[in-house]
Image (tube, grey):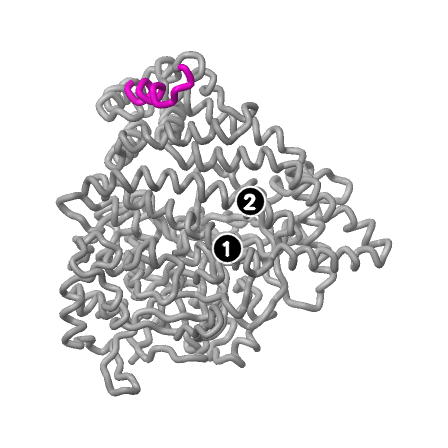
Amino acid sequence: MFKKVTSVFLVFLLILNTTTVKAGGDDEGMWLPLLVQKLNIKKMQAMGLKLTAEDIYSVNHGSLKDAVIALDHGSCSGELVSPDGLFLTNHHCGYGEIQAHSSVEHDYLTDGFWAMSRDEELPNPGKTVSFLISITDVTDKINAVVNDKMTEKERDAAIRKLAAKLEEEAVKNSGKDWYEARVQPFFEGNQYYLFIYETFKDIRLVGAPPSSIGKYGADTDNWMWPRHTGDFSMFRIYCAPDGKPAEYSEDNVPFHPKKYFPISLKGEKKGDFAMVMGYPGSTTRYMTSWGVENEMNITNNIRIKLRGIKQDIMKKEMDASDKVRIQYASKYSRSTNYYKYSIGQNKGLIALNVIAKKQKEEEEITNWINKKKSRKEKYGEALPLIEKSIKALKEPNIAMNYWIEAFWLGPEIIKTSLRGYYGIQRAGENKEALSEIKENQKEFFKDFYMPIDKQLFTAMCETYEKDIPEKYYPSFFETVKKEYNDNFAKYAEYLYSNSIFVNEDKFNKMIENPDMKALSEDPGVMLANSVYALYQSIQKETEDTQYDLQRGRRLYLAALLEKEKDIPHYPDANSTMRLTYGTVGDYSPKDAVIYKYYTTLKGYMEKENPGAPETDEFYVPQKLKDLYNAKDYGPYGITNNKGEKEMRVCFTTNNDITGGNSGSPVINGNGELIGIAFDGNWEAMSGDIAYEPDLQKCINVDIRFVLFVIDKYAGAKHLIKEMKIIK
């Protein structure tokens, strides 16, 4: 399943890179909706689209963009389906909220949840929904404050200063001071666009099927086709009575959007036009050959190794206790998702010979650059800079990737101590702020199991020490070596016994009257500061080389855009709204194998693991069996060409999506909702780096199966009545 991996610290954005790729087939491309009229609309209409570009993106009236949402600033996408703020997204996008509301007594992960009235809808502090208001090209304004004589660092500083001014002016000129504005770079800093958003903060859980539907097949079926997963959940946006965004309040009312999607029961057939709109997170389609090697041998291999260790520790404890299973369900799922993705991506990159293809592209653009002196002067250093920089960054890059997986995404004591200490420091004597910190820590303790965290800490430290050169050790390693005979398990006993940040009673007592001097000496805080100091040290060590790499990438992309100036290009994904269009269809992953474009409830039943517990990957609820045996599908089923009643579950299109697109609407040529995107296929895991049109598939849950589950399985007919159904 597609998920976007996020970090608390914006500094991690330096680790990411954004690139571009030329347009390929009709199915390739993550296009900015602002540019659809200029670049895409005629081709889309020839393929079956009945809408205009203005129907898709408009700042003057309600358009499709106003029915598409970004969850939590782009971690997932969603679509509005009623005039009262009801929206759909994936089950895995709502999984954290479903888990947060679950307990052994009310296990919504296993049993599902359905609010039978609006009073029963559950609030989710911290969850947000953002709407795109407008996009403006500000490239000329940015270019006016930079020049070729600037260093990359000076260039960055000038751009940040102007971007902040443009953002401030945009909000002021809108007359709506709650709007948010962001200037974002595209094509490695060769273009810039200003985005304005409106963000709502009262988001309530309305419904979710049991995991035996919403997560059917779990880790085994993740990224695979054929798929039989009802990957959806439902939320509602609330706002203040005047329609403005507001924090949760009982006085808030359902939000009334400018636009919501009508839902089609007509279904889809092979060759039908299909469009996806959403917020894809990150692709690197024009990563160089050296970058691909780095991604495979460093990023992916380290992720695979360390997450494998972490997941074994979590799974053993989860299998032994229902309480721990619920506590760690979301954490485990987040870890396994990109663990399997990394395995598949490496396999795909090797099978498709991507490095050799990249090398050929680099040779071609080098020859083009060298044909003219002016080009050589302007772009000649691009590829050499990239190669030299990536090779120079290899050792610190390995250390940084271990740091991320072993420490930042490892034992929770590090993050909770760091956030808690500096949060309390900022709060000072502000009782309201301290109360909020206490509430946040209460949520942390609800899903914290110390035996798991201690094991994770010990295992991650031991692995880091064995695999990473001593010059990249955090300073606490020296303490462990001198005072604990290099025994991380013994140090862990001391650490977890004495830090207040992993002891709820001690923390609650402390927060009433914080002593900052005592807190600064807390073992958890000293550990966290040691770990973060290492991060800062690596960043400082690599700063100049990172700027060289940034310059090389910017020049390389500029050369590419000039070389292929007559070909439409789309920028790589960077969590901004994109549109991708294609068709419904089958695919052939290997010789003599053809996958049909849809699955049915029959296949769902065929995958059942008979006698398995409710928490099994292939458990089938009895009620679903009863509906299947009775062929009681309501208006959502069809009669197939054999005259049999059939319930479609999932289907595939060749839309170009990635992490962050989870929950995106799949739209037919009339602008009607026909499905919800939730995954990619195993054979094309290389797609974020190298798109393969013959293999790339977008896996979607059929909207008719979604409605069937809501109506016939859950009995939540009141939700169906809110929607506009096209029969």
* Residue under label 2: 297
Disc ID at residue 325? none
* Residue under label 1: 347
- The residue depicted at 60 percent of the width and 57 percent of the height is 354
Looking at the image, residue 262 sits to the left or right of residue 154; the answer is left
Q: Secondary structure at mark 1?
A: helix
Query: Is residue 488 visible from the viewing direction of this image?
Result: yes
Q: Quadrant of residue 263?
A: bottom left
- The disc, 1 or 2, on the residue closer to the chain's N-terminal end is 2
Q: Quadrant of the C terminus?
A: bottom left
Mark 1 near mark 2, Cβ–Cβ under 8 Å?
A: no
Q: Position of residue 548 (x, y in %)?
A: 69, 40
Residue range of the region highlighted in magenta in the rendering: 485-497
Q: Position of residue 283 (x, y in %)?
A: 54, 54
Looking at the image, residue 213 sits to the left or right of residue 68; the answer is left
Label 1, residues with CA under 10 Å away: few <14, some 14-19, many ≥20? some
Q: Position of residue 632 (x, y in %)?
A: 17, 76
Q: Amino acid at mark 2?
A: Asn
Q: Position of residue 633 (x, y in %)?
A: 20, 75
Q: Nearer the viewer, residue 640 or 304?
A: 304
Query: Is residue 419 visible from the viewing direction of this image?
Result: no
Q: Amino acid at mark 1?
A: Lys
